[in-house]
Image (cartoon, grey):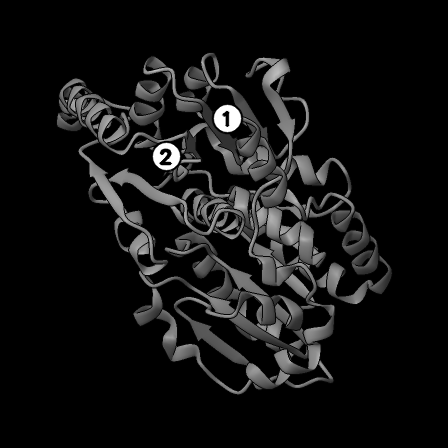
Amino acid sequence: MDKLKFILSGGGTGGHIYPAIAIANELKLRFPDAEFLFVGAKDKMEMQKVPQEGYKIEGLWIAGLQRKLTLQNAMFPFKLMDSLVKSRKVIKLFKPNVVIGTGGFASGPLLQMANMLNIPTVIQEQNSFPGITNKLLSKKAHKICVAYENLERFFPKDKMILTGNPVRQDLIDISSKGEEALKYFNLDATIKTLLVLGGSLGARRMNQLIEKELDKIVAQNVQIIWQCGKLYFEDYKKYNSKNVQVLAFIDRMDLVYAAADIVISRAGASSVSELCIVGKPVIFIPSPNVAEDHQTKNAQSIVDKKGALMIKETELDAEFSLVFEALLKDEGKLKYLSSNIKKLALPNATKQIVDEIVKLIK
């Protein structure tokens, strides 16, 4: 048998890049001598993140369409043509057995070209409400691995498999890491820990909220781990104190989840999947600035199953204190949310997705 070859494409945000890397790692476990190539968008974070994980990446000259008339939109047809031509070249040279897309701009032209060249394609859709790229690609894709139920209105039913989103394997069992976590973050075991997650780049509105409520939260005998994002770290690091740790980003997600009693988080697809697996009580504050309002829909799908609370950005000033204080004092409610969100976890996603990819190898 010839050497197996896989092209993976996903990017723009950690939410698209991380699943692609998790899938590549699992494929590599099964086929140690396989060859891998990633395809990303030239100026996006995948160009740094993927090589850090030990994989080669090619960049396409592509960007998304803006909602308004801009120079970038005027350039879009040229960028798309350029990316299709380059994708064709990459596929012809590399000769992959399967091409896998996890979302983001670059996966559009690449999978479109793979479909035209009759190479099997797999889409991994992280959100409860798919973006336009994946909706268009789904007509020709061979398999579509989804993380939420009821996506028949977007995708052909016979191609869909409910797998969940790939998550970091070290999150699967954090219950044994409690003591290590307290030591690592130097926390007081006798009081509750609040974890605030703004996403890899940070979230301005969430940071403003925590800044405003900080004294009130700490006064309720709570210690805080506040991941403010690298864009905002310089503004907020002055709040570091005995009970407040301000971090640009967190290296040990497994330990920080193990330490947390309550989590306040954005509702990006990969964060939601991780929070289901770790099973902690969550207040979601979805970002309203995301294409097609994905985050609100992701959070709502958990709230509908009584697995979390959600506060919209526009309602933070009126509602946050009330919701947070009530939750903090209600042990029963904390346990109830925790057990309900855990029921929604799909911990074998990566293995299942790779099982589907393996079926397509010619």
**What residue does disc 1 label?**
130
Looking at the image, which residue is at 52% across and 38% down? 295
- How crowded pointer 1 is (Cα within 10 Å; few <14, some 14-19, many 20+) is rated as some
- Left or right placement of residue 321 versus residue 106 in this view: right
Q: Please state which amino acid type lies under the numbered disc 1.
A: Pro
Bin the neighbour count of mark 2 within 10 Å (Cα to Cα): few under 14, some 14-19, many 20 and up. Answer: many
Q: Quadrant of the N terminus?
A: top left
> Quick check: 360 above or below 209?
above
Q: Position of residue 347 (x, y in %)?
A: 68, 48
Would residue 217 appear left or right of 241 to someone viewing this image? right
* Residue 318 to residue 172: above or below: above
Which residue was labeled with disc 2? 104
**In terms of secondary structure, where does tag 1 sit?**
loop
Residue at the image point whose x is 59% and y is 72% from the top:
255
Farthest residue to the front: give it: 1
Question: Going by the picture, which residue comes out furthest to the right?
Answer: 332
Left or right: 161 in relation to 106: right
Q: Residue visible at 34% across and 19% down?
A: 112
Q: Where residue 216 sits in the image (x, y, percent)?
A: 60, 72
Residue 110: assigned label: none
For mark 2, give the secondary structure. Answer: loop
Q: Looking at the image, is 248 positioned above or below residue 244?
A: above
Residue 131: quarter of image:
top left
